[in-house]
Image (spheres, rainbow, N blue to C red):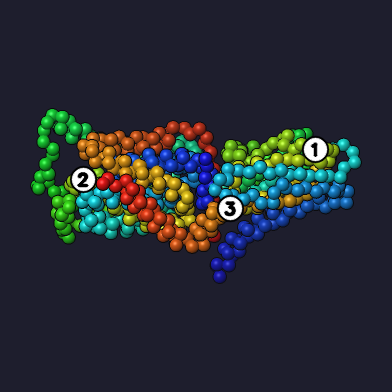
Amino acid sequence: MSAPPARRARSRLPFAAGLLAAAWALTAAMPAAAQEKKQAPLVISVSQPQVRITSSFTGAELVVFGAAETTATAPDVVVTVRGPKQSFVTWRKSRVLGLWVNTDSRTFVDVPAFLSVQANRPPEEMAPPEVLRLEQIGLSRNLLIQRVGTDYADVVPTDPFRLAFLRTQQAEDLYQDNAHGVTFLAPGVFRANIVIPGRAPIGRYDVTATLLRDGHVIARATEHFEVNKSGFEQQVASFSQNDATIYGIAVAIGSLIVGFIGNFLFRKE
Amino acid sequence: MTIYLPIAELPVAIFTVFAMGLAVGFISGMFGVGGGFLMTPLLIFTGVPAAVAVASVSPYMAASSFSGALSYLRKGMVDLSLAAVLIAGGLVGTAAGVALFLWLRMIGQVDLFIRIAYTLLLGAIGIMMLVESVRAIRRTHRGEAAQVRRPGTHAWFMRLPLKMRFRRSRIYVSAIPVAGIGFVIGLLGAVLGVGGGFLLVPALIYMLRVPTTTSVGTSLVLTLVTMAAATILHAEANGTVDAVLAFVLMIGGTMGAQFGARTGQTMRPENLRFLLGLLVLSVGIRVAVDLVRQPADLYALHPIEARQ
């Protein structure tokens, strides 16, 4: 009879995390729902629905086009691209007995492996901080869930682990922050260039365009595209996943053949 | 010109990788070492994830050691019965090493363990080889005869039961220390991601008194078998063997190994040991420097492999 309480205590954890997420979703959805009636129509389009990775792939450049029905002055635009989710560990080194050792770590759970924020001017000038934070506008305001002990939560933007995470991802071009990446072609018509680096993760990329005016969100539109391996790259990857043992044996035999040919070709005779 | 690696999931400059294979292949052919202790850090330096680097170096080492071993086989410089006993111990050691690696991962200090082990191991072996080879070089300079193996100097472990005669190597020793050495090499290979040639060659020469000529070829045979097994194990357990990366490395490596083997055979054994000692010691010092010096960025990011 002592087992059930322990099990219940354990199962409360994911439940609490779920509740947290639900609360988040609810608060995020509320202002959107309130503004549904007066929302201006906005359509966006991505220049290619699929990025194919072939042997010569070194990256790709996509263009997001958008058109909004506006009457007055041009609104502010923020285009956010979120790649597939992945978990990361950020380690901090410190000195122990004269050696630099990983001593402290934070786990970032299911954060975007690619994140690009493009705007027509710095988001800080568009809306008050609470709106930006709620709408996750700007690189530093995107929600990055950390596992803190037994809890799941995002932390203050000045958290050193969070800053280090953003810095490292930006250095790899996997996280991008461009306050002048959105250009207007005509009032209400805009474009943003999205650069996908060579080492970008495989999967679905969600594009969200948000229109703001006078510090309020007036419209939002979403679109997505896929980054996939194709041809030979795809065949090798799926072979290694579906028939791991045969793949391993094939690579081992292949290596012996290469070794043999190498020896045969260079034999002195 | 770049090529996209399907498992590592990033583009790399094809000639850089080829040149790395060529250079490490030359060294491995010359000294009869697998070259893993050089190749794995080089790959990680170019941005390949550590798990993929360690796993893809295995087929590379299998290819270059097979190519090298064939040359030695043709010249009769491989002791096959000695290799068989070493392999028997080596395979058990590999299995034990995988278990040890899992345990280290569980307590969360693989990185530190590997660095300290590298420093101690490479440092100690490098210094031992340097001291010994410098003595040998001085002796030849003074015109003294090379060290003659005296029958009375057999260590206690060579007199254990299960004595075997290894004709090629002209030794008559117990099979227990031979399999034991194979076990240790297999264990260290699985934990540190190295082929173990740089450990095996000196162990054969100094502990078992195997002549330098057969020790290199025999070591290559053990590297070949353990690395072929490691390729299959890595592919099955981790799915991190990148065939494209491995084959580009291999082509460079087998070419380099041929030139290396030829260069190695024209050199005096003690000079060869001196150079290998220098190389091993400098890699050890390099690892130690990283451990002691303050890193440029105190934070490091590691993706958690999401594998179903």
How busy is the neighbourhood of tag 2: few (under 14 within 10 Å), some, or many (20 plus)?
some
**Label at residue B213:** 2
Find disc 3 in the rendering and name its residue: A229
At numbered mark 1, what does the secondary structure look like: helix, strand or loop?
A: strand
Please give the label number shown on residue B214: none
Q: Could you tell me which secondary element the residue under label 2 belongs to?
A: helix
> Which quarter shows the N terminus of chain A?
bottom right
Quadrant of the rendered image containing residue B81: bottom left
Chain for mark 2? B
Give A222 or B305, whichever is nearer the viewer: A222
Q: Residue at x 24, y 41 (%)?
A: B265
Q: CA distance from mark 3 to mark 1?
A: 33 Å
Instruction: Compute the Cα span from label 2 to label 3.
Output: 48 Å
Q: Position of residue A222 (x, y in %)?
A: 75, 50
State the mark number for residue A185.
1
Identify the residue at image location x=37%, y=57%. Answer: B229
Same-subunit check for callouts 1 and 2: no
Residue lying farthest front?
A: A269
In the image, B160 versus B242, the foreground residue is B242
Residue at 32 percent of width and 46 percent of height? A266
Residue A173 visible in the snapshot? yes
